[in-house]
Amino acid sequence: MKLLIFNCGSSSLSFKLFSVDSSLTPKILLHGKAHRVGVKGTEESFIELNQDGQHTVVPMQLDSHAQAAGQIIQMLQKLDIQFDAIGHRFVHGGSLFTSSTLITPLTTPALERCLPLAPIHNPNSYSVIRACQQSYPGLPEYVTFDTTFYSQMPDIAALETLPNAFTKQHDIRHYGFHGLSYTYIFQHISQTLNLDLAPLKIIACHLGTGGSSITAIKNGKPVDTSMGYTPLQGLVMSTRCGDLDPFIPLYLMQVHNHTASELNQIFNKNSGLLGLSGFSSDIRDILKSADEQHNPEAQAAIDLLIHRLKKYIGAYAAILGGLDILVFTDDIGLQNPAIRHLTCAKMDWLGLELDEQKNRTAPLDCLSEIQTAKSAVRVMVLPTDEESIIARDGFNLLQEVKHADL
């Protein structure tokens, strides 16, 4: 079975074509990514495509994810690429979805009800779904949710401290996100190292160029996670504020007459590293400015990013009752040894000791361990692959539907 997978980021659109069979080991046939979607700046948007060892880059204006999907589809059609179904990452399924589902006239209204739950992700994913439906009418499409991973999270971590009747009425709870990434990490470490992770205490840091989160895992299940009702809560992110006193938006609306739309833009698009530094959401730019220009705003952005990471690691180590494995993944976690160094510094109280040489030379394409020989905590760095989890879920889902129709 050939499955085309779309994965919407806040300013990107990744795509991969997999061949999947009953072994559930997806094989990548081609992959690519639309970069700087909807971003205005000095650098041009572009789509990259990798197939059969050939790397193609096509610069073009990409004002929206729907437009990017249309351009990708045109590229695939020109190459006469065929597939059996299309899978989509959908960040927030709310309480309506706890597993992957086919997109049908019955499920579409429920998906539409989920759009406001992740305002910079779900609408983009839905626009890509609509673009695919227009180009491939009748072809099966399905969605896999980031929130599914947290359906087994303990109630004590999922509860929000609002009146019970109110939270039940509005389906308000701590949902958690990046679940596809954490699912992949857990499975990949276990399979690669032939390691039984079930009894181990794990803290995983998904540090991306858009969103970042941290999750505590024990007995193979999430115990707690930094993102909450939406992907806005938690760590300092590229343009998202992370943890914030909930009275701040009330004050800004009541006293200074800011609208909900204005605050949504500020909290999601203008805050985080961008808001703190005043000039960039890219951690590489900020590190360079702090190091070479001694920029105090850049240094403050780095300091708060690390402070928030350490705070969550410490809290989750307390909840887990210790720590066996600390994981870094996604673009910042994988590609930035300086952030790993700063995060792990002065963590000897946990028994964690980083090997600086291994940290600096950690490969970008495979799992590596960067702790010293005497460290009580294993520190792992690895690329994530959310799309392969979507492909596996899709294969199982489509097989179930096929057998149900027989």
Image (cartoon, helix red, strand yellow):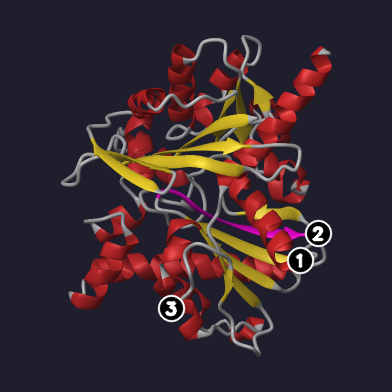
| Measured Cα–Cα span from mark 2 to mark 3 | 31 Å
Circle 1 packing at 10 Å, graded few (<14), some (14-19), many (20+), is few
Q: Secondary structure at mark 1?
A: loop
In the picture of the structure, the residue carrying the numbered disc 2 is: 219
Q: Residue at position x 75%, y 43% from top? A: 23
Q: Which mark is residue 194?
A: 1
The answer to whether residue 401 is above or below residue 251 is above
Task: Estimate the spatial distance between the alpha carbons at disc 2 and disc 1, rounded to whole Å.
Answer: 16 Å
Q: Earlier along the polypeptide chain: callout 2 or callout 3?
A: 2
Instruction: Locate the N terminus by quadrant.
Output: top right
Extent of the magenta region: 210-219
Q: Residue at x 68, y 38 (%)?
A: 392
Label 3 sits on residue:
360
Q: Taken as a whole, is the magenta stretch helix, strand or loop?
A: strand
Q: Amino acid at mark 3?
A: Arg
Callout 3–callout 1 Cβ contact below 8 Å: no
Dots 2, 1 in contact, CB < 8 A: no
- Residue 105 x/y as whole percent: 62, 9
Residue extending furthest bottom?
A: 374
- What kind of residue is marked 1? Asn
Q: Residue at x 69, y 83 (%)?
A: 376
Residue 345 rendering spot, x and y as whole percentages = 50, 81
Res 64 visible: yes
Residue pushed farthest front?
52
- Residue 69 in the image: x percent, y percent? 39, 27
Residue 103 is left or right of residue 274, and the answer is right
Callout 3: helix, strand or loop? helix
Alpha carbons under labels 3 and 1: distance apart: 26 Å
Q: How far from the left and from the top, in percent, is residue 181?
A: 59, 50
